[in-house]
Amino acid sequence: MPNAVVTGANRGIGLEFVKQLSKAGYNVYAGYRTFSQEMEDACNGMIQPLDVSQQHSVDDFTTNLPSSIDLLINNAGVADGRWQSIEEIDDNIALEVLNINAVGPVRMMKSISEKLSDGAKVVMITSLMASMEDCKTGRSYAYRASKAALNMFSLAMKNELKTRNISLLLMHPGWVQTDMGGPHAEVSVVESVEGMMKQIGEHSIENTGIYMDFQGNKLPW
């Protein structure tokens, strides 16, 4: 059975990835900040605490993983206060958001890189809000910046990973009905993850570094 790792696995998109990957025949290794019984029940592999804002937590997590990882879902993330104005920006919250959303996946890649198998796939859960071309409304300053930084980290990484036959996808899950997305969001968690699973399955090394949504639409940088 192939091995998959999911970060931020205790709720929302991460939890749904645990469910669908387990049903698809993966051994799932789930990292969480807050324990969820639903996650434990759904996961057919290992669950373990994981705080991507701390390198020691990331290293403790990856130490317990098998030597060959076929799929990594870098999903852990947080939102900011969606500040209305420049004057409202909280620099401490902004730094926390950047630390978790942008640097957190880098910590994971540093720690897990040697365990990624030949032909492995790395998925970065990003956002359309990272797009500089599509930034028409402003607000959500730290969240936008953190996901844009994640995109650039990922683009730089994909060149190195390609030499090892490891492909990378940057995926926008849509506006999803989660704690972060809110009840008025347009896409259910199940629909979003089903779509992303389809895109992951069809992805090849030739398209490594692509920035796309859960329906397979290419997004503007």
Image (cartoon, rainbow, N blue to C red):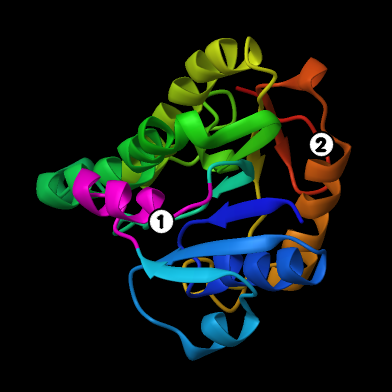
Residue 61 falls inside the magenta stretch: yes
Q: CA distance from mark 2 to mark 1?
A: 36 Å
Q: Is residue 187 visible?
A: no
Q: Nearer the viewer, residue 99 or 135?
A: 99
At mark 1, the secondary structure is: loop
Q: Nearer the viewer, residue 8 or 212?
A: 8
Residue shown at the point (58%, 10%) measured from the top left: 159
Above or below 209: residue 172: below
Does 48 sit left or right of 216 as displayed?
A: left
Above or below 106: residue 70: below
Name the quarter where the N terminus is drawn.
Answer: bottom right
Above or below 76: residue 86: above
Residue shown at the point (58%, 79%) measured from the top left: 183
Mark 1, other Cα within 10 Å: few <14 / some 14–19 / many ≥20: few
Name the quarter where the C terminus is drawn.
Answer: top right
Mark 2, other Cα within 10 Å: few <14 / some 14–19 / many ≥20: few
The residue under label 1 is 64
- The magenta segment is 50-66
Q: Position of residue 76 (x, y in %)?
A: 44, 55
Question: Depth-wise, is mark 2 or mark 1 nearer the camera?
Answer: 1
Type of residue at label 1?
Asn
Q: Earlier in the sequence, mark 2 or mark 1?
A: 1
In contact (CB < 8 Å): disc 2 and disc 1: no
Q: Which mark is residue 52?
A: none
Q: Is residue 145 visible?
A: yes
Residue shown at the point (79%, 66%) measured from the top left: 191
Q: Position of residue 55 (x, y in %)?
A: 23, 44
Q: Which mark is residue 217?
A: 2
Type of residue at label 2?
Asn
At mark 2, the secondary structure is: loop
